[in-house]
Structure formats: C-alpha cells, structure tokens
Image (cartoon, helix red, strand yellow):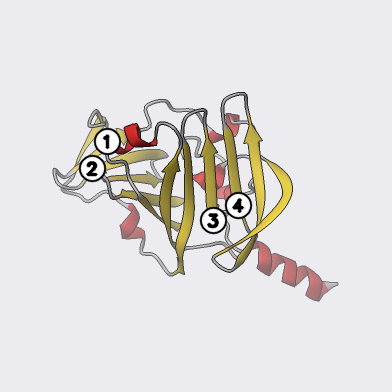
C-alpha cells in the first residue's frame, strides 16, 4: 500500500516545464479573406510553475503574451519599443473558470507519437475540440487564485492537461493548432519577468 501511494504521488507531481511549439492552419469560406491580413501561422508556449509566455509567430503581426503569476496579470510585450501592456490584445476578459467545461468524447488520436483523448464543447455557432494526454499537464492548483490566466491548459474540464491539438470551427472559418515540438527543459524564472528597462502601460491598442 505504501509503495502504491508513493507511485501515485510521484505521478501527480510530474508537471511539465519547458517548451511547446505548434503550427496553425485555417480553412473555410473566409480563409482567403483572413489570409489577406497575414495571420500568425505558428505558436510557441513556454511554461514554468504558474508562469507562461506565448509567442504567436509568422504573419504580419507577431505577438508575445506573458502571464506573470506574482502580478496575476497577462501582458502583451512590445519588444521593439521596450513596452509591456498590462491588458493584452485579448480585449474582452472572461475568467477561464466561467467557461463551460469541455467533455470527453471517447475518441482517441495519436499526435506526435502520443495517444491523446479528445474533449469538446459545442454551441449553436462553435465547435471547440482539444486533444490531451495525462503525460503533459500543469499543476492547476497554482492557478486557483489567478483568474486572469487565459492559457489553453486551463480550459475547464481538461484538468490542467496541455492540448497537443486544438480545433475551433465556426460557421465560416476553422482553425487547427497542432503541436510540432515538445521540449521538457528547466526554465529560468528571469524568462518570465518584464525587463527593468521596459515601460509598463495599461492598454495595448496596436491590434
């Protein structure tokens, strides 16, 4: 019994720290219209404890978002002008905890050699699907009082599991975000801080 309990504790404490990289693909009747604005085509996400950085790469306007747990704010980062905006480009703030939970579908798929379970949520206008594995997850208890965190692994129902694939289908457009690289690695806490010479502003109106 003691050995079994120890094994369970070890599994529960095996939380991910490191890097995820994704490709972003779009389809649908409005694809051509959307592509005129040169949307981001890749995403990178780095995480350590309850801090994360998301880089949206490619396209006309690369973007960087940083959630700093100590401040309980997500910032959009303007590296070129050494500015950090406390309200990110996500203009409408809605706590993850208030979103409807996704439900398991019973379907499975192999992604990057990892067997994943599919979860989804359906409304009249939107289908949202997430493929996750117990192998990659974060400690959601660290986010219990961090209501401004908006990372995809905090979607209710996922239990802190990091999506390896995400699909969002609306009436005229579908986006699919699929992992291309997973790199567990020790991250320095300085990578999740705003440099001292950056100006912190309240709102980002660039996009």
| Residue count near mark 3 (Cα–Cα under 10 Å), binned few <14, some 14–19, many ≥20 | many
- Quadrant in the rendering for residue 134: bottom right
Image spot of residue 21 (x, y percent): 41, 59
- 55 to 201, vertically: above or below: below
- 91 to 141, vertically: above or below: above
Contact between labelled residues 4 and 2, with CB atoms less than 8 Å apart: no
Specify whether residue 88 is in view.
no
Identify the residue shown where x is 59% and y is 34%.
127
For mark 1, give the secondary structure: loop
Image spot of residue 144 (x, y percent): 57, 41
Q: Please tell me whether mark 1 or mark 3 is closer to you in this view.
A: 1
For mark 3, give the secondary structure: loop
Of mark 3 and mark 2, the one earlier in the sequence is 2
- Quadrant in the rendering for residue 133: bottom right
Contact between labelled residues 4 and 3, with CB atoms less than 8 Å apart: yes
For mark 2, give the secondary structure: loop
Identify the residue shown where x is 80% and y is 72%.
4
Contact between labelled residues 2 and 1, with CB atoms less than 8 Å apart: yes
The answer for how far apart the CA atoms under marks 2 and 4 are is: 28 Å
Q: Which residue is mark 2?
A: 60
Contact between labelled residues 3 and 1, with CB atoms less than 8 Å apart: no
Q: Please tell me whether mark 3 or mark 2 is closer to you in this view.
A: 2
Q: Which residue is mark 3?
A: 164
The numbered disc on residue 131 is 4
Of mark 4 and mark 1, the one earlier in the sequence is 1
The numbered disc on residue 37 is 1
Contact between labelled residues 1 and 4, with CB atoms less than 8 Å apart: no
């Amino acid at each position: 019994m003691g050995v079994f309990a120890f094994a369970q504790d070890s599994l529960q404490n095996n939380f991910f720290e490191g890097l995820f990289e994704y490709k972003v693909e779009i389809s649908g009747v409005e694809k051509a219209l959307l592509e005129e604005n040169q949307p981001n085509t890749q995403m990178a996400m780095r995480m350590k404890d309850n801090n994360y950085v998301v880089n949206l790469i490619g396209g006309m306007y690369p973007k960087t978002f940083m959630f700093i747990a100590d401040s309980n704010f997500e910032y959009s980062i303007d590296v070129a002008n050494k500015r950090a905006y406390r309200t990110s480009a996500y203009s409408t703030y809605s706590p993850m905890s208030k979103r409807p939970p996704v439900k398991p579908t019973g379907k499975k798929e192999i992604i990057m050699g990892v067997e994943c379970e599919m979860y989804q949520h359906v409304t009249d206008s939107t289908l949202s699907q997430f493929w996750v594995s117990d192998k990659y997850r974060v400690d959601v208890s660290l986010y219990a009082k961090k209501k401004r965190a908006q990372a995809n692994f905090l979607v209710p129902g996922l239990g802190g599991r990091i999506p390896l694939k995400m699909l969002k289908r609306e009436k005229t457009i579908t986006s699919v975000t699929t992992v291309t690289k997973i790199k567990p690695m020790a991250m320095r806490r300085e990578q999740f801080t705003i440099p001292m010479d950056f100006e912190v502003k309240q709102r980002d109106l660039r996009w």
